Structure formats: structure tokens, C-alpha cells
């Protein structure tokens, strides 16, 4: 059975005062003019997974203006074994809340119900932007395999903020650092190991597929030096680096310094040196590999959110992408400015037209 959202309701969310969509498990082609609210629908779907969604926006930013009443999203999520009613909402800009089948739940619980992958235009710069964007991209893929990675990351970041505060205050007493570095080393080593496993899974999933998209050889590197592999080694490295870190005012050792390095395998060219079209094709290859590996694990592919996916893809690769999605059996929510961008899908997809009237987005199912 395909993982799918078969019903989606948006209330006072972004440009949508109210929208109610009932769809089946086929891919969904969403088209309309720029600014009509297409990406807002994808963002709504992304919030049925842990985190801040595909735009990484605050709850307050997602509320419809000028009313600013707060927003609510409701979905029926069909998994391989169950059907769930899921709600998520925010009132007055407060942190969003989650309810699953009528019971309050954590965002982490969302990751156990629905695995969601996305590709948005800002990712087109992945290979040439700073390391933080690549780490975030990698960690989203890690969380798709291991939802608990989110909790580990939060624990690590909290301990690092506290250690950085000591460093900036020039605290030299070793006793203040011991417990924090123990926590950092334990969670940091687990984060690093999970990233390693994910890189290996993606590599295998790419090599085992016949696809029109190029294979990206991946490696996990550090911006400086090498990442200690074990908790013991990381703790020793943190202790050794205290005075250097104090001079810098921040922690210079650990998985927060990691970088995802990619190479276009067939050409032996670093991804950052490839053409715009090649960089986009490598990204698509990784998203498909991630989806393929998840389908093997869960028996069903994840939800795919592909915003302006046709950009930088020629007609042949666009058709190949649609064939891959249909072969996976994935419910993919895709956006584009016109229906012609999805012509290769024919009856394999359902279509939503999004228009804007008097500042209110309207959606028509075709």
C-alpha cells in the first residue's frame, strides 16, 4: 500500500483562508501562476513530519495575514498498515501542536507515521552554498531513516550552546566542562555514526538503480581535521581543544563541523563544479535514492514534495523523473507554473490548479 495523504484541509495557513483537498494515492501536479499559493500547499504537507517544514519558518510566519488568528492543518494519512487523522496547529504564533487520532503527540511521533522528503528551489545551490545547508540536507535524510536523530541533534545543540557560553565567558575551570563534554561526545558520536550509515545507504541505493539521473559519490568530511569516530575519542578531542575553542569563542570539534562532499561519478567532477543542470540532476538522484531505500525498509515509499521540480531539467530528464516516481509508487506533490510541465504524466497523476482572487488562494481539483 502507498503512503499517502488522501485528505488535506488548510485553515488560515499562509495565503489559504480555507482549502479542502480530497485526493487519491497518485502523484499530484499542482500548477498556477507565481504567488498563487502552490508552495504553501507543499509546506502544509511538510508539516506532517517533524521539524519546521520545507521553508523552516516560524509558526507565526505561517499564519494568514492580516487576520493573524493562528492556523490549523488536518490530514488523513494512509500508511501501509493504518489510516490516521492528524492535526497540527498554532495559536497566536505559539509553537505548533500535534494531535494524532485525537490524542496529543510529539512532533517526533509524526516521523513514525509518515516519512516525507522534499526538494525545493533553494536546494539548487546545495553544492555551492555553505556547509550548514549541506548538513541540514543530510540530517533530513538521516531523520527519514532514523526519526530519533532529531532528538539526538537537539540534545547535542543544547549542550554545545552551554559549552560555548562558558568559552565566551572565558571560564577555565575544567569541572564546568566535564558533564557537558560527556553529553556532547555521547550524542555527537551517535550523530556522526547515523550520518555515516545514511551516506552508505544512499550510495547503495544509487548504484542499484537504472536511472536517467547521475550517481553522486558521497563522502562525509570535516571543515577542519578529522571527526573522532567514537565517543571516547570525541570527548578527548573536546578536552584537548578547550583553549583553542576559548580563543575562538565557540566549539571547533564535533559533528556540527561536518560537510557532505559530492562528486559526479561518471565525470569525476566535484558537484560544486558541475553545471546548474547537472547539480539539479545530482540532487534528484539523491532524493530518489533516499525514497528507494525507505521503500525497501518500510514496504512503501515516502511522500515526495517537489517544488518547481521541472526547473533546470530538460524534457527527457523530466519524463524520466515522472517515470521513476510512478515506478516507486510514491505520492508526489509537485508544483509548476503550467499544466504542460506535467504532460508526460498523462492519466498517471491528478491535477490541482491554484489561482488567487482578492488575495485568497483558490484550488480546483481536475
Image: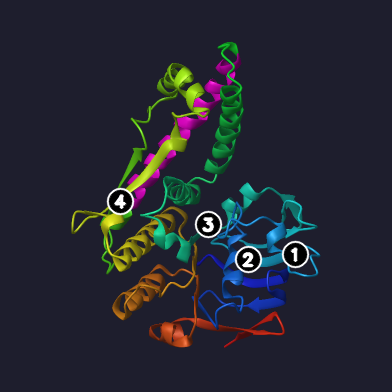
Count of residue discs? 4
Residue drawn at (56%, 77%) of the image? 24
Q: Report, in whole angstroms, how far the alpha carbon at label 1 lies from the one at label 3.
A: 23 Å
Q: Quick one: which residue is furthest to the left in this view?
A: 267
| Residue marked by disc 2 | 44
**Could you say which disc has been placed on residue 262 in the image?**
4
| Residue marked by disc 1 | 71
User: Considering only vertical position in the picture, is 213 above or below 126?
Assistant: below
- N-terminal label among 1 and 2: 2
Q: Are marks 1 and 3 in contact (CB under 8 Å)?
A: no
| Residue marked by disc 3 | 115
Q: Report, in whole angstroms, how far the alpha carbon at label 1 lies from the one at label 4.
A: 39 Å
In the displayed structure image, the side of residue 183 where residue 228 appears, left or right: left
Residue 146, x across and y down, in percent: 50, 45
- Crowding at dot 1, Cα within 10 Å, few <14 / some 14-19 / many 20+, comes out as many
Report if residue 310 lies within the magenta region: no
Q: Report, in whole angstroms, how far the alpha carbon at label 1 lies from the one at label 2.
A: 10 Å
Q: What is the magenta range?
A: 176-204
Q: Are marks 3 and 2 in contact (CB under 8 Å)?
A: no
Query: Regarding mark 1 in the picture, which secondary structure is present there?
Result: strand
Residue 226, x across and y down, in percent: 34, 30
- N-terminal label among 1 and 3: 1
- Crowding at dot 4, Cα within 10 Å, few <14 / some 14-19 / many 20+, comes out as many
Q: Are marks 4 and 2 in contact (CB under 8 Å)?
A: no
Q: Are marks 1 and 4 in contact (CB under 8 Å)?
A: no
- N-terminal label among 4 and 2: 2
User: Considering only vertical position in the picture, is 227 above or below 43?
Assistant: above
- N-terminal label among 3 and 2: 2
Amino acid at each position: 500500500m502507498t503512503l499517502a495523504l488522501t485528505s488535506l484541509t488548510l485553515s488560515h495557513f499562509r495565503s489559504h483562508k480555507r482549502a479542502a483537498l480530497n485526493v487519491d494515492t497518485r502523484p499530484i501536479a499542482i500548477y498556477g501562476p507565481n504567488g498563487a499559493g502552490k508552495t504553501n500547499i507543499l509546506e502544509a504537507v511538510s508539516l506532517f513530519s517533524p521539524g519546521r517544514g520545507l521553508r523552516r519558518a516560524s509558526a507565526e510566519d505561517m499564519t494568514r495575514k492580516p487576520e493573524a488568528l493562528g492556523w490549523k492543518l488536518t490530514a488523513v494519512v494512509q500508511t501501509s498498515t493504518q489510516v490516521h487523522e492528524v492535526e497540527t496547529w498554532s495559536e497566536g504564533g505559539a509553537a505548533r501542536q500535534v494531535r494524532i487520532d485525537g490524542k496529543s503527540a510529539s512532533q517526533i511521533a509524526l516521523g513514525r507515521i509518515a516519512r516525507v522528503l522534499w526538494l525545493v528551489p533553494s536546494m539548487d545551490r546545495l553544492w555551492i552554498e555553505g556547509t550548514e545547508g549541506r548538513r541540514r540536507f543530510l540530517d533530513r535524510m538521516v531523520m527519514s531513516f532514523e526519526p530519533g536523530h532529531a532528538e539526538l541533534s537537539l540534545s547535542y545543540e543544547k549542550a554545545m550552546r552551554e559549552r560555548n557560553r562558558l568559552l565566551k565567558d572565558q571560564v577555565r575551570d575544567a569541572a564546568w566542562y566535564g558533564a557537558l563534554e560527556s553529553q556532547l561526545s555521547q550524542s555527537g558520536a551517535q550523530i556522526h555514526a547515523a550520518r555515516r550509515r545514511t551516506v552508505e545507504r544512499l550510495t547503495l541505493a544509487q548504484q542499484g538503480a537504472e536511472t536517467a539521473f547521475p550517481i553522486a559519490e558521497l563522502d562525509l568530511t570535516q571543515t577542519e581535521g578529522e571527526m573522532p569516530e567514537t565517543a571516547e575519542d570525541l570527548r578527548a578531542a573536546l578536552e584537548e581543544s578547550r583553549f583553542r575553542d576559548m580563543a575562538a569563542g565557540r566549539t571547533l570539534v564535533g559533528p556540527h563541523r561536518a560537510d557532505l562532499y559530492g562528486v559526479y561519478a561518471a565525470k569525476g567532477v566535484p558537484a560544486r563544479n558541475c553545471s546548474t543542470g547537472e547539480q539539479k540532476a545530482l540532487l534528484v538522484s539523491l532524493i530518489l535514492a533516499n525514497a528507494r531505500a525507505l521503500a525497501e525498509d518500510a514496504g512503501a515509499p515516502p511522500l515526495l514534495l517537489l517544488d518547481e521540480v521541472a526547473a533546470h531539467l530538460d524534457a527527457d530528464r523530466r519524463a524520466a523523473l515522472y517515470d521513476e516516481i510512478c515506478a516507486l509508487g510514491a505520492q508526489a506533490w509537485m508544483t509548476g507554473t503550467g499544466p504542460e510541465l506535467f504532460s508526460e504524466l498523462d492519466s498517471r497523476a491528478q491535477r490541482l490548479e491554484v489561482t488567487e482572487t482578492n488575495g485568497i488562494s483558490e484550488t480546483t481539483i481536475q
